[in-house]
Amino acid sequence: MKLSQSVDFTQTNIFPAVSGAVITLSDDAGHSETLSETSVAGQYQGRTVLGQPGRRYTLRVQAGGQSYVAASTLPAPVVPLTGLHAQKSNSGNNIQLVPEYQDPAGVPNFYLFRQYRNGLLNPAIFLQDDEFTDGKANIRALGGGGRGNSGGGSGTDVNKLATGDSVRVEMQNIDSTAYGYFRTLNLLLQNNPLLSTTPANPRTNFSGGAQGYFSAHSRRQRTLIVPTL
Amino acid sequence: MPAGTYTVEASFVGYQAQPRHLTLTKSQRLDFRLSAGGQELNEVVVTGRAGQVNVSRAQSGVETLDIKQIAKVPVLFGEKDVLKTLTLLPGIKSAGEGSSGFSVRGGSVDQNLILLDEATVYNASHLLGFFSTFNSDAIKDLTVFKGGMPAQYGGRLSSVVDIRMKDGNDQAFHGSGGIGLIASRLALEGPLVKNKGSFLVTGRRTYADLFLKLSRDATTRSASLYFYDLNAKANYTFNDRNRLYFSGYLGRDVFGVNNFGTNYGNQTATLRFNHLFSDRLFSNTSLIFNKYSYQITIQSNDQDFSIDSKIQDFHLKQDFEFSPSTRQTLRFGVDAISHTITPGHVTASAAAPVNATPDRTNHSLETAAYVSHEWSATDKLDFTTGLRLSEFSLLGAGDYSTYDTEGNVLTTTHYNAGQFIKNYLNLEPRLAASYQLTDNTSFEAGYARNVQNLHLLSNSATTLPTDLYVPTSLNVRPELADQLSAGYYRRLGANHTYSFSAEVYYKWLQHQIDYRDGTQLQANQDVEASLLYGKGRAYGAELLLRKETGRLTGWIGYTLSKSQRQYTDINSGAWFNYRQDRPVDLSIVAIYQLSPKWSLSGTIVGSSGQAVTYPIGKYMVAGQVVNLYGLRNADRLPPYERIDVGATYEKPHQEGHRFHSSWNFSIYNLLARENAYSITFQQDPNDPTKTQALQTALFRMVPSATYNFSF
C-alpha cells in the first residue's frame, strides 16, 4: 500500500509520502489486520490477511483526519497464462507480445498486464476484457497501454522490444472496479490532443475524495526471449 | 391586386411591345403573343438582387448565403464550403479549427438540422470534418434559422440549415468544373425537355491517395484514402399547375490500410411534387429518404469481422400554403418520419477473435402537424403566429431498460415489433411580431419553442464518424429549448448600400444530455446507463453590418454571448461554461473587385478561446505521474485569431467562345499563427521531474490554388 499526497501543478514531481496513517485490511471471511508502515515512508504492508479467489477485501485508510474506504474482490477463477509469443505489429515494424490464455465463458473477466523489458518496467498499463471475446482464446497483443506506448513499445526506445530481449509479462486478474479505474486512467494518459476530449479524473474505487485504486488480484507471469521475426 | 382598371404591357428584346387595357374584377389569365421586330437594342442594364435585409418581414435570426456570394471567400485548401463560410456569421461558431461542426447561439453540434433539399444530413463532414459534404457546384443557396424557426421546421433545438441544390439549366447544355489542391469537380446540366425540365449532375473526388502511391513503403502504397460526393437533381414541369422535382446525394469517405478498412457517408433522395390548386392554394408533397452509415471491417483469412452502424429515415411531408388575401398567408401541413438506428453492431465469422453482438437496432416514429399564420395587421405591423404539435414514439421490437440515478438497471422489458413503448407529445409555439418604424428601420421580437428527439453522443470536441445517435426513450426525454429574441434592422447609405442588424436572445435548454466521465461510447452496449441529464442557458447579442453592392462587398459580424450547462453530477451541480462558450467573436469578410479580371478577398476572424479543463495538481499512481483535475471547463484556451486572403483571376471572355475559366488563389492563416487547438499536459521528456504544457495547432499557413472552368 503506497500513500502519497498530490502537489500543485507547477511544482516538481516530488510527492510527499503520507506517514503515520492507520490502515486496516479486512476480508468477508472475518479476517482483519492493521498494516504497518515499512522502512520506506508512506509504504504499508500486511501479513496475515491473505488472498483467496472470490473473497472481497476492504481497505480503510485514516490519514490527516480523513477516512477513505475501498473494496475489491479477488476474481475467481484465476485464469492461467498458458503461453506468450511475440509478433510484428500490424502497422509497422514494432514487436508486440501476445499473452495466451483461455477466457472463461459466461462470466465477465478483466485482465491487466505489465511488461518488463530486460528487467525494466514499461509504464504502459495494458488492459483486456472479454466484452466481445467471451470464451475465446486470446489473440490480442499488448498494445495501446498508455502515454504514447502503443503496440508494446513504439513509444520511447527504452521500452521498444528487439530480437534477443528478455521480456517478462505479468498477468493480473482484476475485478470490474479496478478495471474501470485503469481504463479511465488510460483514457487520461492517452488523451489525444486531436480529439481534445474533456479530461476527467479516473473512476477510483476509494470513497472520501482520494485518487488512486485498491485492487485485489492474482498474478501470473511468463518470460520470453524475443526471437528473430 | 385590388380590383380596378389596369394597363399591362408585355415586351421582350427584339419584339414589339404590346400593351393591353383591362378591368380587373376577378382572377384571370392572359396570354400574350409578341410579334418580332421593334427597336434596336441600345443599352443593357444589368441589376443584381436586392439587399438582404428586408426590413418589413417578421423574421429574426435568419441569414442567407448565396453560393455566388461566397465563391470568392478564401477557405482552407481552396475548397469552397458553405458550412465553413456559415461560421463567419454572428452567432454561429465553428466547433473547432477545421471542423464542419458548428454551434449556433450556444447550442451543441447535433442541435442543428441540416437539410439538403429537405433530406436530413446527419453527418455533414468528410475527412474528420475538414470538408463538408456540400459540393459547392451543386448548391444554390443556404438559409440558416438561428432562432424563431418557422413552424414547418422542427426536430432540432438550435438551428435549421436549409440547403437547396441548384436546378439545371432548362435551355441549353452546360458544364463546369475545377481542379484543386485536394479535389476535382465536374458538373453537367441541361434541359431534359426544353422549357419544361432540366437536370444537374455533379461529382467531386479527392485524390490524396494518388500521392500515397508515390510512397516507398508498401503498406502506404496499398492504402486507400479518399472521399467523393455525387449530387443529382432533375425537375419537370407538367403544366402551370404541376411540377415534379427529384434530388439525390451520395457521398462516402473511404480509408483502408492492410486488412483494416473503414468507410462512412450519407445517402439522400427527395421526390417533391408541387401542385397549384388555385392562385391562392399551393401544395408541396415530399417523399424523402436519408441514411448515414459507417462500416469498419477487419479481414484476415477466415477471421473476418465487421462493425456496422446506420441511422436511416423515411420521411413523408405534406405542406399547404393558402393566401386568402394579400395581407395573410396561412401555412399548414403534416409530416411523419420513421427512424431506424443501428448502433455499432459486430458481425463475426466463427473463427474470428471476437463474438458477434446482438443487433440493438431501434425504431421510432416522429410525427408533427403545424399551422402558421402570417398577417400584416397594418402597413407597419406584421405578426407570424405558429404552432407545431410534435409527437415522438419509441417502437419495438427490443429490450428496453429503466435506470436509477446511478445508472443501475431497474427494470428491463421486452417489446414486440410495432409495439409503442413510449410516446412524447409536445406543443411548440412560435410567435413573432415586427414593427416598421420608418422605410428603413424596423423592430422585431419573437418567442419559439423547439423540441429534439434524436441525440448525438460524442466524446470528441467536434464530431467523429463513429459518434452515437440515441433516440428519446424511457429514460432520455425530449430536449427542449425556449428562445426569446429581439432585433433591430436598418438600411443605411444612399441606395441602401449597407444593412445593419442587431439581435439579442436568451435561450433556456431543458433535458440536455451528457455522460459520466470516462464513458466509452464506441461499441458501448448499454450507453443509457452512462447518461446524465441537465439544463442549459445561453444568451447573447449579435451585430451584423453588411454591404452587398458595389466593388467592395462583405460583412462585419460581432457577437457577445454566453452558454452554460448544469448537471447534478458534474461540478457538484454548479453551472459551468459550455465547451463552445466563446464570449467574444468577431469576423470580417471583404471581397473587392479590383478590375474586371481580378478580385481580391480577405477574412479576419478573432474569438475568445473555448472553455477547457486544465489540471489543478498532480499525483503519483502505478508508477506514473497523473494530472489531477478540478472543475470542468473552468479554464479557457488562448484567443483564436486568423487572417485568410484570396485572389481570383477571371480570364477575359472571348467573343464567340462559351468556355470561361478562372484561377483562385488563397492563403489560409496568412500570419501562420499557431492557434491552440488543444493544450495537453505531460511529463517533460527531458526532465521527468517537471510537467510541461503542450499546445497543438492544426494549420499554420496553407496556400492553395484552384482552376475553375465552365462552358
Image (spheres, coloured by chain):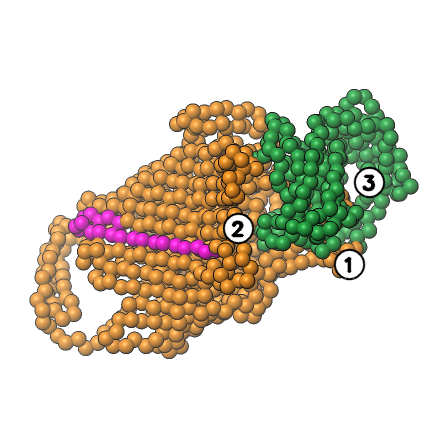
Chain colours: A green, B orange
Say which element carries label 1.
strand
10 Å crowding of disc 3: few (<14), some (14-19), many (20+): some
Say which element carries label 2.
loop
| Quarter occupied by the N terminus of chain A | top right
| Chain ID, mark 2 | B
Identity, as a three-letter code, of the amino acid under mark 3 = Lys
Question: Which residue matches tag 2?
Answer: B258
Question: Residue B237 location, x and y as percent?
Answer: 20, 51
Mark toward the start of the polypeptide (2 vs 1):
2
Q: CA distance from mark 3 to mark 2?
A: 44 Å
Callouts 3 and 2 on one subunit? no
| Chain ID, mark 1 | B
In percent of the image, x 72 and y 37: which residue is there? A171
- Res. B687 mark: 1
Question: Residue B451 location, x and y as percent?
Answer: 44, 40
Identity, as a three-letter code, of the amino acid under mark 1 = Asp
Question: Residue B549 location, x and y as percent?
Answer: 36, 69
Query: Closer to the observer: label 2 or label 1?
Result: 2
Q: Is residue B124 left or right of residue B322?
A: right
Q: Is residue B198 left or right of residue A23?
A: left
Callouts 1 and 3 on one subunit? no
Foreground residue among B62 and B289: B289
Foreground residue among B259 and B182: B259
